Image (spheres, grey):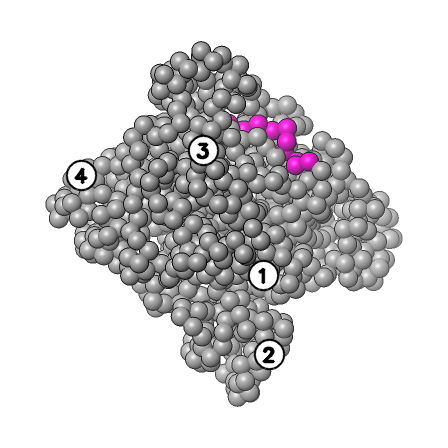
Amino acid sequence: MSERALEGVKVLDLTNHIAGPYCTKLLADFGAEVVKIERPGGDPARRMAPFHHDEADPEKSLVFAYLNTNKQSVTLNLKSEKGVEVLKSLVEESDVLVENFAPRVMPSLGLDFETLQQINSRLVMTSISNFGQTGPYRDYRAADIVEYALGGLMYIFGAYDREPLKHAFNQAQFKAGTDAASATLMAMYHQRLTGEGQRVDVSIQEAVATGLRDVVNNFTYSGAVRRRQPNHSGDLSRIRASADGHLIPNPGLGAGFDWKTLVDFLDLPALDDEKFGTPSARLVNAEELGRILDEHFIKQNKYDMFYASHEKRFIFGVVQSPEEVMADPQFAARNYFVDIDHTVLGTLKYPGAPFEMSGTPWEARSPAPTLGQHNQEVIGQRLGHTPEQLAQLRATQII
Amino acid sequence: MSAPLESVRIIEMGQLIAIPFAMKMLADMGAQVIRLESTGRLESYRGDSVYKNDISGEFWNKGANFYEQNRNKLGITLDLSKPEGRSILKELIATADIFAENFTPRVIKNFGLEYEELRKIKPDIIMVSSTGYGFYGPWANYGATGPATEGAAGLAYQTGYLGGGSPVMADIPYTDYTSGEHTVFAVMAALMHRLRTGQGQFVDISQTQATSSTIPEVLMDYSANGCTGQRMGNQDTAMSPHGCYPCRGDDRWITIAVTTDKQWQSVCWVLGQEAWAADPRFEDSFARWKNRDELDALIGPVTSFWYAHELMHALQREGVAAGAVLDSKDLLFDPHLNERGFYEVVAHHESTGIPPLPYASRPWKLSKTPAVAGKAAPLMGEHNSLILSELLGKTTDEMAALEEGGIIGYGPTDPRPVQRPSLDEQVRQGRMQRYETDFEEQVRKGFLM
């Protein structure tokens, strides 16, 4: 067993769906002990597609399986007094509580930070919500697309003359989950130094709005409002079609970049013209440049161009399909995809370490738990409830 | 109240976003970040998007993106191509907790800055490398931009409009932020470990890997089922309606996402479309999802009578997830973000001619250990004297010799500003939606300056 970065950090995980579970997954995958509290019906993410072999079953959601590695699952009905009591005894011995309910939910269960802090003054309580714990939109609802819109990323995303677009899937949730994991550890660092707990408020809208370039700045620096960029553009970082897919033929930024070297590499004498020779000229003649580049790259093979460009230290990129990602030689050399064996799903390849740590590596110690898999272990052994008490909790549907 | 990372010193050899963004987040929370730059190889953000597009004078101290990414840092210049420069860097690293960089392994090895070398100088150093594809492996030395890793990671492939066409990527270096967010977490995990054990380590961030870790929806589906999804535009795999619809005004839009029947009834009621509510094609969530193209075609013409914000509030009052698509000005003046104090006003050095301006802060608030008060990114070489004389004890003579030998400096050796086209030209090209000449006044009033 290797050393774990977050050895000894005890996390009580009340999260569901994506943002919260990704936060606690990061903590768990780097060694924290995470007890996931699920409502009796389970985390709604258990009902999220895609499923293994398309079989809709609470133990077969693939996203759930990914998001909940290395966690223990305990079911608990927090709408019952007894359930809240059990939760409070878990709070007593935890460092961190993470939740991503709507802001009104925890107080309505009698589990506001002030109350929990009286039980455990060292507690770090991290709340992730759509718009944060304060402010006029606090109770507004959202989905990932709404966060893209109100976070400022959507207006500049997509084609000039079409509706704004968002990334596929749930990127805003993942951003906020990562931010929440970072902020939780900042508070934990302070806790380990001083013994003091605190409240951490993470907003998904702000997670999106923090990660923008040349948006608000364009207005404060020049009064300009940036729009989605026009299709025909000489912007060298744009995606272009190849014969077999797409590539990003960006030669590379920086003061030392030499246009002539690119012209020679592409063997495109038409570009050997002062209309394109400097960054300023390329901005002015963007449309013509864009057309020439499009006509060239549509005839090329994307990986040929990718590898050839890097031989010359250009920095072209390649658009990979899921199949190509999973066959990518770089990922293979870094053992990024790992086999995880799950009682119901069997052995599957999962995306592994988001980054590598030499001393305390990412680990898949255990697969996502089945619903309530650790009731006995956590409530029985850790909290010292007798088998009779456990049976009682089960009979009254508290667990 | 003190910031949580006040005892942490970071030496940053960063460029553009991936590492500078992450280190800014740590600087905000109290870490002392000493940022290294080269006078010979001007960081492009220093001279791009400059204040009022005015490249006269010290343009390298006027770039918007440089200020955005380097708040709360100290800045020094060092020429690492010279042995004296590398030796000063190593002196600095010997005093530090963290060394963070985002250059290719080739550059780091040329400078003798691998982890194995650094731990000889500082045994418990945490070294953080952020690269496009990772520090080792066949693509390790491949330089990358945000779009390249967005493509390699599998995110771009799935993103785009319905009905074919090309994948679409964010018009920002999106994965720089994704990996930057993971970098902050990685540094905190390494610091937690060091606090417990006294040990440093090497953190190897692959920007592609961090990004692939945020798309299990497709990678797990492919892994388990061999499925590759279609590009779905703004549609969702379960919700409908789920999309971006036109509103009144020029290039104005709203997003709406409906889960339950009750929410759907509310949408019909707010939009005054009782007939939709009774239409069997839309009677339950499965029917709405199956008929989502028809539904989307019906909704757009109706929302276009509404102002986006009015419709957002009307729908939210009924419990429907809806959000106006905010442009840069809307985002800056958004009442909710401003009520939460999301923007922080930062004063700039007098010599730049830039007034105090608001900048986006952070997505978290820590109740007991808030962020430090925002201080502008350093002028080029602003803290040479503070760091080299006060921290490393260089004498006045030594400082003069360093400047004489070009090891340190206060401006680029080869200043080549990039002149952007005029705003009129940028609007004509479609890069900008519009510009407002009274923006200074608006910003000043909006932030009570």
Q: Which residue is pictured at 76% across the width and 51% down the height?
A: A113
Q: CA distance from mark 3 to mark 4?
A: 33 Å
- Name which residue type carries label 2: Ser
- Name which residue type carries label 1: Pro
Q: Using the image, tell me which numbered label, if any, was put on residue B266.
A: 2
Q: CA distance from mark 2 to mark 1?
A: 25 Å
Q: Secondary structure at mark 4?
A: helix
Q: Nearer the viewer, mark 4 or mark 1?
A: 1
Q: CA distance from mark 4 to mark 2?
A: 60 Å
Q: Using the image, tell me which numbered label, if any, was put on residue B379.
A: 3
**Residue A157 shows in this picture:** no
Q: Nearer the viewer, mark 3 or mark 1?
A: 3
- Name which residue type carries label 4: Lys
* Residue A209 in the image, given as x and y percentages of width and height: 52, 53
Start-end of magenta stretch: B2-11
Chain to which mark 4 belongs? A
Q: Which residue is pictured at 48% across the width and 37% down the height?
A: B349
Chain to which mark 2 belongs? B
Mark 1 packing: few (<14 Cα in 10 Å), some, or many (20+)?
Answer: some
In this rendering, position of residue A334 left or right of residue B184: left
* Residue B367 in the image, given as x and y percentages of width and height: 70, 45
